[in-house]
Structure formats: C-alpha cells, structure tokens
Amino acid sequence: MRFVPLFDRAQIEVRTRELGQEISKHYGQEPLICVCVLKGAYAFFTDLMRNLSIHPIMDFVRLSSYADQTSRQTKMVFSKDIEIDITDKHVLIVEDIVDTGHSMKFLTKVFEARGPKSIKIAAMINKHERRDADIIVDFEGFSVPKGYIVGYGLDYAEQYRELDGIYDLQFSEKQDT
C-alpha cells in the first residue's frame, strides 16, 4: 500500500475555517442542530464546530452501509439515533465523505420524516466518482474525483483515522475504488 497525500493539515485547517464562516453566515441567528455521522466525521466535526461563530446544538448518529454482494443494493445499519427533537429546526448533517450518496439519502429521509425546517449536508470530501443517489453536498470541504480516501477520520478496515492529513490509499494491486 502507498499513501499519496491529497490535503495536508494546513490545507484542512484553512478549508475548515472557511466552511465555519460560510455555515455561520448562512444560518445567522437561526437555531441550528449539527449532527455528526460517526465514526468517520468525528475529526472534521470537532474542527468545524470550533470554527463556527454561532452556537449550535450538537448530536451524533452512527450509520453504516454495507453493499449487498449479489446486487447494487446497499443495506443501512442505523445503530445510534439522535436524542434531540429536530421538529421545525434547521439540521446540518456533518459527514466525512459523500461517495455513492446512499448513506446520506437514507439519513435525510429519516430526518425529513421528523419535520425539520431544513436539512443540509456538510462533507469534508465530496467524491462524485461513484455517486448514484440524488444527493447534494451543501458545504463541501474538498472535491475528490476518485480513489480510496483515508486519514482525518476516514478509514480503511478501521485503520488510518488518526492521520492528520487526507490521503489516497493506493493498493499494490489495481482495485476498483
């Protein structure tokens, strides 16, 4: 395996600061609930929250997706729900990476049924290569066309989340990522 640097810590800090300003300006004095999608978004979420000039309510969900080996179907495991009532409130979902879009499509549908005022998505990485769900990333850290992305919360087999940069993990054998 080889780690090809995409974004270093300084670039991430600059972009997270810019996103914090953009999000703060967008919501102004409107009450906001920020929801971190565990595990991957923890680093981005922490840095993003520190860069807001507003004071949101924070909560967490745990959502995992597993591809069905016999079809293009994706199964969602929703193992931790938010504890806050989002009815008539603005909700910002904070995700590490939006790839196919299936996880975000699932989560936005779950939240829409609870009657929020709005739902928007912030993602550190917006990866369009395999997108097949109709989902929009409203606040994008970086756009990455392809690759297996690790670091800054993103993992490969639960490893490499601790890396302070973002890397394209390249395997010695050509793999479809």
Image (cartoon, helix red, strand yellow):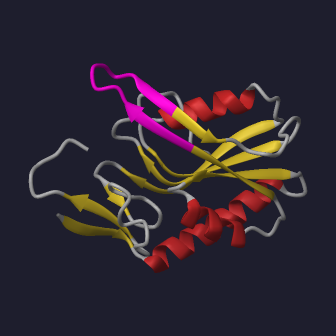
x, y percentage for residue 51?
A: 70, 71
Q: Is residue 129 magenta?
A: no
In this view, the residue farthest toward the left is 173
Residue at 72% x, 58% y: name it.
Answer: 23
Q: Residue at x 71, y 48 (%)?
A: 92
With 88 as the anchor, is 126 left or right in this view? left
Image spot of residue 90 (x, y percent): 81, 43
Residue at the spot 10% in from the left edge and 58% down from the top edge: 172
Residue 68 part of the magenta-drawn span: yes
- Where residue 167 sits, quadrant-wise, is bottom left
Residue 80, quarter of the rendered image? top right
Residue 87 to residue 122: above or below = above
Left or right: where does residue 141 sit relative to residue 93?
left
On screen, 146 above or below 54?
A: above
The x and y percentages for residue 7 are 39, 70
Quarter of the view holding residue 100: top left
Residue found 79% across the figure and 29% down from its top: 114
Between 1 and 78, the one lying in front of the other is 78
Inspect this view and state whether residue 83 appears: yes
Q: In the image, which residues are magenta?
A: 63-76
Residue 145 relative to residue 9: left or right: left
Q: Residue furthest top?
A: 71
Q: Residue furthest bottom?
A: 10
The quarter of the image holding the C terminus is top left
In this view, the residue in front, 95 or 128, is 95
Q: Is residue 149 above or below residue 47?
A: above
Q: Position of residue 32 (x, y in %)?
A: 82, 51
